[in-house]
Image: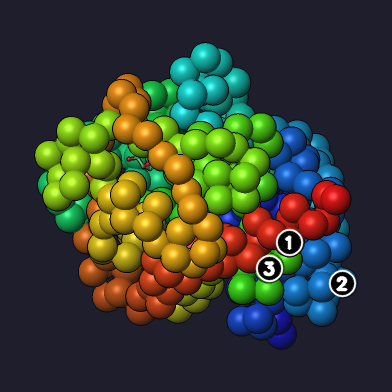
Amino acid sequence: MKQRVLLTGGAGYIGSHTYAALVEAGYDVLIVDNFCNASREVPTRLSAVTGNDVQVIQADVLDRAALDRVFADNAIDAVVHFAAYKSVGESVRNPLAYMQNNVGGLVTLMQAMESAGVRRLVFSSSATVYGEAAELPTPETAALGYGNPYGHSKLICEQIIEQTAAADPRWAVGVLRYFNPVGAHPSGLIGEDPAGVPDNLMPYVAKVAAGELPVLSVFGGDYPTPDGTGVRDYIHVSDLAQGHVLSLQALERDGTGHVVNLGTGRGYSVLEVIAAYARASNQHIPYKIAPRRPGDAASSYADPSLAKTLLGFEAKYDLHDMCRTSWMWMQNATQAMD
Ligand code: NAD
Ligand code: WQD
């Protein structure tokens, strides 16, 4: 019997790649998404990628009655919860919306799961829960903190999960702390599609390479890093997607939860990313050094060893693959809009 997995936020960037990885691993997958930050084309594109008839229910994870119906109508074995808001800047401007959607969404989902008797969950957390990480590379035991309401909402979610699992050991929750997800599916059919001007580095670089934006501002050239620009642990979204498959398998196997970093363990500077993207796209990428962005750390990269020990997880794609697949997606997405 195939395991049936519910993906909340499954039409989004990481959710759609995880859909593809789960189908490939033999899972039967159902998506719940309200499409507040996803294209309506994603299910059709996922059908093309997987050859599957993609099942999508349009619903909000804050809608308890809708979730109850999903559990009543489908024999769900486990849930992967992606649905959330993710813009740091927006969270500073509107903290209540972030708490409601991210914290309220998790609580509503876990209540619906509990009443349906489903207690296997994988949760999208973030390296942002380390705040300004003091330890590099950062292990899961590092001190936790937050620098903005988005990060705070993820930390609260982790605490809610920990307390719920302590109260009832039948819960088995995989908390996955993503570092910096980038890149796109090798098919070129799904990828990240931010509305407006991107906040994050790689989607911004992609638009400069494509000539849609004139120049990249490099936020800070005087950090205590080898070339003075910020260093991050970029991880290909397909590797990240595979991490969810392994997390679900570990929950099934062990019957108990885990909290792990998903990163490569290797940091790259902004200038290294620009150079790699220029090579992969064969485009010139104009940039200028600009002031630091408030709240940014100099460096962030994972100690990925626990994910290897507990889940057998290891990233396979390198920076060139991340840039190459991002560029393929960028060209396909642009053509689709022409
Ligand atoms: P995304 O915005 O592309 O995907 C989120 C999906 O959830 C979207 O399809 C959106 O329509 C949906 N959604 C949001 N609120 C909903 C609600 N109330 N009900 C139903 N659907 C809802 O974001 P992503 O980059 O794929 O991120 C997925 C998860 O991973 C999020 O929880 C995010 O916080 C976390 N995360 C992302 C990153 C990153 O850099 N992308 C890093 C660390 C953690
Ligand atoms: C990477 C590097 C910037 C844009 C954010 C969130 C984090 C997580 C992932 C969800 C930094 C520099 C960027 C630009 C630049 N999200 N940069 N010019 O800040 O590590 O993480 O996204 O959980 O919570 O904070 O990622 O891609 O924004 O920045 O120079 O136009 O690129 O200063 O050094 P970040 P990013």
Left/right of residue 96 with respect to residue 92 in the rendered view: right
Nearest-to-viewer mark from 1 and 2 = 1
User: Which sits in the foreground, 123 or 299?
Assistant: 299
Which residue shows up at 78% across the image and 47% down it? 39
Q: Secondary structure at mark 2?
A: loop
Residue ID for mark 2: 53
**Mark 1 nearby-residue class (10 Å; few <14, some 14–19, many ≥20):** some
Q: Does the residue at mark 3 contact the one at mark 2 (Cβ under 8 Å)?
A: no
**Mark 2 nearby-residue class (10 Å; few <14, some 14–19, many ≥20):** few
Q: Does the residue at mark 3 contact the one at mark 1 (Cβ under 8 Å)?
A: yes
Residue ID for mark 1: 332
Q: Mark 3 vs mark 2: which is more N-terminal? A: 2
State the image coordinates of residue 139 (x, y, percent, origin top left). 20, 55
Does residue 320 sit above or below 198 in this rendering? below
User: Which sits in the foreground, 234 or 106?
Assistant: 234
Tell me where residue 90 sits by quadrant.
Answer: top right
Amino acid type at mark 2: Asp
User: Which sits in the foreground, 236 or 276?
Assistant: 276
Task: Tally the marks.
Answer: 3
Residue ID for mark 3: 188
Does residue 293 sit above or below 30 in this rendering? above
